[in-house]
């Protein structure tokens, strides 16, 4: 949902990292302390210490010290005065991996960073291009809101509205997998901000919010063998919907859900379990099981990762072992599933998802459905996943299906170095305007047909 989410949109094993040695001479730090220490060393120009004492052997080989220096200087050159390191978010993964993302704030810009630690050695490090604050369009306004106010998991959010209008159609935005802020920020992208602003300019209200796992981290997933997508995503999406429908400026009969990636896969279930939307919009989702998609993603990562043949074969065997476990999920008990992991995820998490078959729910829908897919998406396959939608919905009178040439998983047009890899996401770009316009036009078409 989040390569993240190595991206935030999907839970994907970072296979190459398994090869990294775990010897470590670094002092005992928490991930947050380690991130502060590394950033401080970079900020003060001590690249040698970062490279020699914090980088693991594989990372030292892939990022030479002079390259590290060039990249840091290039990203931070126009920053101005240093302000703070903040917005740290830690995600624990299988095999002792800890992924930490955060922001380095300067007076003129904010620099995002992503670090992956294995036993306190850095085995992954990236610096997306610096992101300057975009300006809110003059025709819209934004309000801070709280989703789930009074519950154990209050979430900060933003309601975006066209100025001086009421009786508005509205959309709830639902994230992909992994911890994600309200903008669904990933590297240099902020797709939910782009969509919210673009739809509001067309006269549509939009609510977006920080994901529970982003805001509360380990507290939100303290019982990892019990958590399901209901706790992770569905419950908060329904709470956001209730908040939106209670707003007197909103037409409660014309509230839609827009889910991206994993959020798109869950959108029909969210509708079924309490969302009760006027229509469903799915961006880069799939009717296939999540574990099947992650299996394909792992194979693709392996094929595109430089390593010797012996190591590659070893990793392929690990992937196939995980796939065999995934195929057993439907046959084993819930207790058995809770005791196993599959592709780094708890088996019960995946088994519970399978009990709400996306294809089965969608085939029974009696409301408008809009499926959108980027043809250059390397996370959710145009060939496999979009084709699956076409086959499932070929006789549906309620479904509209559209694909977009040259657009990636976040509906961004990118051609250049690193195309077809997560390097794409390091170049600041926005969601394609045609996609946002198509969503708005589709919504207003439904409104006309219903009135």
Image (cartoon, grey):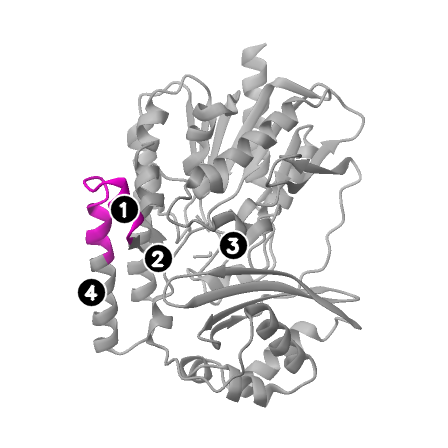
* Residue annotated with mark 1: 337
Residue depicted at 62% across the width and 39% down the height? 208
- Dot 4 corresponds to which residue? 317
State the separation of the CA atoms marked 1 and 2: 13 Å
Task: Answer few, some or many: residues within 10 Å of disc 4's Cα (few below 14, many 20 plus, some between 14 and 19).
Answer: few
Question: How far from the left and from the top, in percent, is residue 21?
Answer: 37, 81
Packing grade of label 2 (10 A; few <14, some 14-19, many >=20) is some
Label 1: which secondary element: helix
- Rendered image quadrant of residue 304: bottom left
Q: Earlier in the sequence, mark 1 or mark 2?
A: 1
443 over 375 or under it: above or below: above
Judge the density around disc 1: few (<14), some (14-19), many (≥20) Cα neighbours within 10 Å: many
Tell me the mark number nearer the camera, choosing from 1 and 2: 1
Report the residue at 63% width, 18% height from top: 252
The residue range painted magenta reads: 322-340
Question: Which of marks 4 and 2 precedes in the sequence?
Answer: 4
Q: Nearer the viewer, mark 1 or mark 4?
A: 1
Discs 1, 3 touching: Cβ within 8 Å: no
User: Is 91 displayed left or right of 138 in the figure?
Assistant: left
**Do callouts 1 and 2 mark residues in contact (Cβ within 8 Å)?**
no
Cβ atoms at labels 3 and 2 below 8 Å apart = no
């Amino acid at each position: 949902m989040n390569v993240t989410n190595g991206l935030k949109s999907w839970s994907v094993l970072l296979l190459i990292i398994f090869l990294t040695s775990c010897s470590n001479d670094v002092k005992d730090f928490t991930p947050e302390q380690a991130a502060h220490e590394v950033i401080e060393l970079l900020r003060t120009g001590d690249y040698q210490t970062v490279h020699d004492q914090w980088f693991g052997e594989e990372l030292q080989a892939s990022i030479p010290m002079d390259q590290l220096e060039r990249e840091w200087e290039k990203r931070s050159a126009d920053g101005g005065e240093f302000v703070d390191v903040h917005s740290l978010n830690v995600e624990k993964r299988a095999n002792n991996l800890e992924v930490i993302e955060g922001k380095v704030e300067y007076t003129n810009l904010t620099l995002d960073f992503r670090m992956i630690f294995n036993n306190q050695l850095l085995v992954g490090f990236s610096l997306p291009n610096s992101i300057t604050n975009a300006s809110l369009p003059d025709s819209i306004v934004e309000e801070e809101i709280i989703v789930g106010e009074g519950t154990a998991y209050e979430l900060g959010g933003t309601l975006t509205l066209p100025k001086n209008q009421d009786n508005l159609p509205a959309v709830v935005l639902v994230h992909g997998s992994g911890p994600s802020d309200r903008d669904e920020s990933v590297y240099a992208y902020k797709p939910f901000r782009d969509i919210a602003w673009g739809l509001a300019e067309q006269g549509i209200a939009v609510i977006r919010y920080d994901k529970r796992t982003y805001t509360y981290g380990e507290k939100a997933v303290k019982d990892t063998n019990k958590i399901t997508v209901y706790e992770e995503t569905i419950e908060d999406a329904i709470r956001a919907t209730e908040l939106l429908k209670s707003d007197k400026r909103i037409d409660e009969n014309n509230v839609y859900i827009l889910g991206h990636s994993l959020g798109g896969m869950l959108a029909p279930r969210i509708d079924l379990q309490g969302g009760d939307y006027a229509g469903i919009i799915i961006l880069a989702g799939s009717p296939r099981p999540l574990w099947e998609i992650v299996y394909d993603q792992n194979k693709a990562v392996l094929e595109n990762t430089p390593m010797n043949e012996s190591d590659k074969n070893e990793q392929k065997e690990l992937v196939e072992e995980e796939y065999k476990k995934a195929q057993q999920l439907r046959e084993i008990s819930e207790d058995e599933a809770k005791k196993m992991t599959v592709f780094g995820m708890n088996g019960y998490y995946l088994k519970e998802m399978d009990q709400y078959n996306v294809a089965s729910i969608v085939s029974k829908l009696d409301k408008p459905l809009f499926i959108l897919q980027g043809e250059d998406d390397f996370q959710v396959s145009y060939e496999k996943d979009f084709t699956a939608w076409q086959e499932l919905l070929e006789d549906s009178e309620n479904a509209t299906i559209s694909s977009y040439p040259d657009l990636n998983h976040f509906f961004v047009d990118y051609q250049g170095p690193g195309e077809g890899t997560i390097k794409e996401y390091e170049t600041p770009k926005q969601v394609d305007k045609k996609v946002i316009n198509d969503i708005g036009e589709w919504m207003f078409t439904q409104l006309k047909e219903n009135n």
